[in-house]
Image (tube, grey):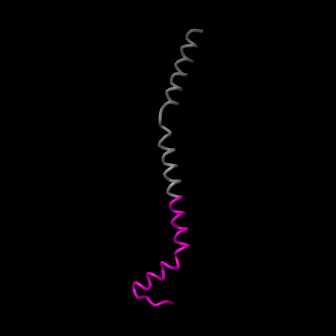
């Protein structure tokens, strides 16, 4: 019985040390960065849709491109 308890105890200690590690933190960090990137991209798209016509007209007038 003593051998079994030592085996279980060592396995629990190894499992506990695995839980305390930060191995999964890189994955969570990458997912967080990707989420922030998508939010920024969505904000840029919304701003460009709201100002899109004005920006295009400003470029045309700046470069002297005739309107079609």
Residue 48 is one of the magenta-drawn residues: yes
Name the foreground residue: 2 vs 65: 65
Up the image or down, 13 lies above or below 54; here it is: above
In the displayed image of the protein, which residue is found farthest to the left? 63
Asked whether, in this view, residue 63 is left or right of residue 17, the answer is left
Residue 43 is one of the magenta-drawn residues: yes
Q: Which residue shows up at 55% across the image and 17% down it?
A: 9
Q: Main secondary structure of the magenta part?
A: helix
Q: How many marks?
A: 0
Q: Which residue shows up at 49% across the image and 89% down it?
A: 67
Q: Which residue shows up at 60% across the image and 9% down it?
A: 1
Q: Give coordinates of residue 24: x percent, y percent.
A: 50, 39
Q: Give coordinates of residue 18: x percent, y percent.
A: 50, 30
Q: Give coordinates of residue 60: x percent, y percent.
A: 44, 84
Name the foreground residue: 10 vs 44: 44
In the displayed image of the protein, which residue is found farthest to the top? 2
Q: Which residue shows up at 50% across the image and 30% down it?
A: 20
The magenta segment is: 39-68
């Amino acid at each position: 019985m003593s051998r079994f308890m030592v085996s279980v105890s060592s396995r629990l200690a190894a499992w506990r040390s695995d839980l305390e590690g930060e191995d999964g933190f890189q994955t969570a960090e990458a997912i967080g960065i990707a989420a922030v990137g998508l939010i920024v991209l969505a904000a840029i798209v919304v701003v460009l849709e709201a100002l899109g016509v004005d920006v295009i007209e400003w470029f045309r007038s700046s470069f002297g491109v005739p309107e079609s």
